[in-house]
Image (spheres, rainbow, N blue to C red):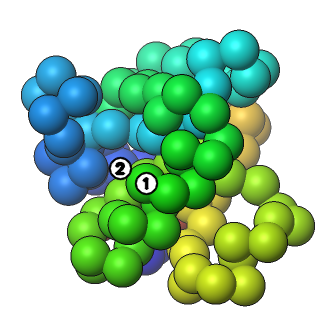
Amino acid sequence: MKTQEGPCSRTGALFKTAESGGKGELLDADPSYVTADEPLISNLKLNLKVVYAGGEASQDHLGQAGVRAEEAILFYWYTPQWLNAELKLTEVMLPRARQLRRAREGDEVARTRPTTCVR
C-alpha cells in the first residue's frame, strides 16, 4: 500500500505480538545474521521491535503459519528464496536515503512523496 511517510511509523500496532513488548514485531531469523533492521527502525522512527525466531527454519515456519492464518506479519526476507513460490508476499519498500535527508531538512515535497508500508 502506498502511503505517506508519517503513517508508516504508526503501523506497529498491526504487527504487535506478545513477544514485541507493545510494539509491532519485525521477525528476523537468527541474531547472528547481519542485518540493518534495528538501525532502520530507529532511523525511520518506526514503532517496531526486532524479534528473533532463532534460525531461518523457524522464521520460515512462523512466516508460513502467519500467512496461512491471514495474520499481519512483517519479517526480514530476501529473494530469490524457495518460499516465495509458495507464499504470496508483499515487499515493503523503504524510503530512499535522499528522500529521508530532504524530509529532515524541511523539504515539504519530500515529506509528501509516497513510500511503501504495510497496513
Residue 34, how many percent across, how many down?
Answer: 77, 20
Of 111 and 11, the residue lying toward us: 11
The quadrant of the rendering that contains the N terminus is: bottom left
Position of residue 98 relative to residue 19, above or below, is below
Residue at screen point 35% across, 49% down: 8
Of 48 and 50, the residue lying toward us: 50
Marks 2 and 1 sit apart, C-alpha to C-alpha, by 23 Å
- Residue at the extreme right of the image, as rendered: 80
Under mark 2, the amino acid is Cys
Q: Tell me: 115 left or right of 118.
A: right
Residue 53, how many percent across, how many down?
Answer: 48, 34
Query: What residue is disc 1 on?
Result: 62
Residue 65, how many percent across, how many down?
Answer: 38, 66
Of 114 and 11, the residue lying toward us: 11
Number of labels in the image equals 2
Secondary structure under badge 1?
helix
Secondary structure under badge 2?
helix
Q: Earlier in the sequence, mark 2 or mark 1?
A: 2
Query: What residue is disc 2 on?
Result: 8
- In which quadrant of the rendered view does residue 39 lie? top right
Q: Is residue 114 visible?
A: no
Of 79 and 97, the residue lying toward us: 79
Residue at screen point 62% across, 26% down: 30
Under mark 1, the amino acid is Leu
The quadrant of the rendering that contains the C terminus is: bottom left
Q: Is residue 98 visible?
A: yes
Front of the two marks 2 and 1: 1
- In which quadrant of the rendered view does residue 55 lie? top right
Residue at screen point 87% across, 67% down: 80
